[in-house]
């Protein structure tokens, strides 16, 4: 695992979406120590009329990146390195981002999620 959900505004081009999916996956494998084969990425475009920052429509690119990993499978340093690498990838791909663009790494208990019909706890908590 992990599961990565990226919501961005404006909508990415197909080339940007491909670069983001590959870059997010690479970061999870190289920095987070996750298995490529079970790293899932979903990229979605937000409706610009429905996204505001400070009560105003955002005049520049913005993003919300939500990452779910198994609790305890990454150190504080690894998570900090992931946030930095994710941010760099977003800026390199989309251009300068609004300051209120967020990256969240959620740690879920191994017994609370899984794939293929087994929880992470049943798999021995493997990343």
Image: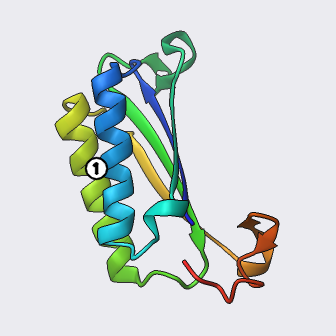
- At which x and y percent is residue 30? 29, 70
Residue 119 is at least partly visible in this image: yes
Left or right of 87? Residue 104 is: right
Left or right of 37? Residue 83 is: left
- At which x and y percent is residue 123? 70, 83
Residue pictured at 38% horizontal, 20% vertical? 58
Left or right of 62? Residue 114 is: right
Splitting the image into 4 quarters, where does residue 53 fall? top left
Residue 127 or residue 93, whichever sits in front: 127
Splitting the image into 4 quarters, where does residue 78 fall? bottom left
Residue pictured at 77% horizontal, 74% vertical? 119
Residue pictured at 21% horizontal, 49% vertical? 88
- At which x and y percent is residue 18? 34, 34
Q: Quadrant of the N terminus?
A: bottom right
Q: Say which residue label 1 marks.
A: 87
Residue 21 or residue 102, whichever sits in front: 21
Q: Residue pushed farthest top?
A: 49
Q: Is residue 27 above or below residue 73?
A: above
Give the total of numbered labels.
Answer: 1
Q: Is residue 24 above or below residue 60?
A: below
Check disc 1 and report its element: helix, strand or loop: helix
Residue 107 or residue 50, whichever sits in front: 107
Residue 99 is at least partly visible in this image: no
């Amino acid at each position: 695992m992990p599961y990565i959900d990226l919501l961005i505004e404006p909508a990415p081009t197909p080339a940007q979406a491909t670069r983001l999916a590959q870059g997010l996956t690479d970061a999870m494998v190289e920095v987070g120590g996750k298995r490529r084969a079970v790293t899932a990425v979903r990229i979605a475009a937000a409706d610009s009329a429905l996204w505001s920052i400070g009560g105003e429509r955002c005049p520049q690119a913005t993003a919300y990146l939500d990452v779910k990993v198994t609790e305890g499978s990454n150190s504080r340093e690894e998570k900090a390195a992931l946030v930095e690498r994710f941010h760099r990838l977003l800026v390199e791909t989309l251009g300068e981002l609004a300051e209120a663009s967020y990256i969240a790494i959620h740690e879920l208990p191994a017994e609370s999620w899984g794939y293929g019909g087994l929880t992470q706890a049943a798999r021995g908590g493997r990343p």
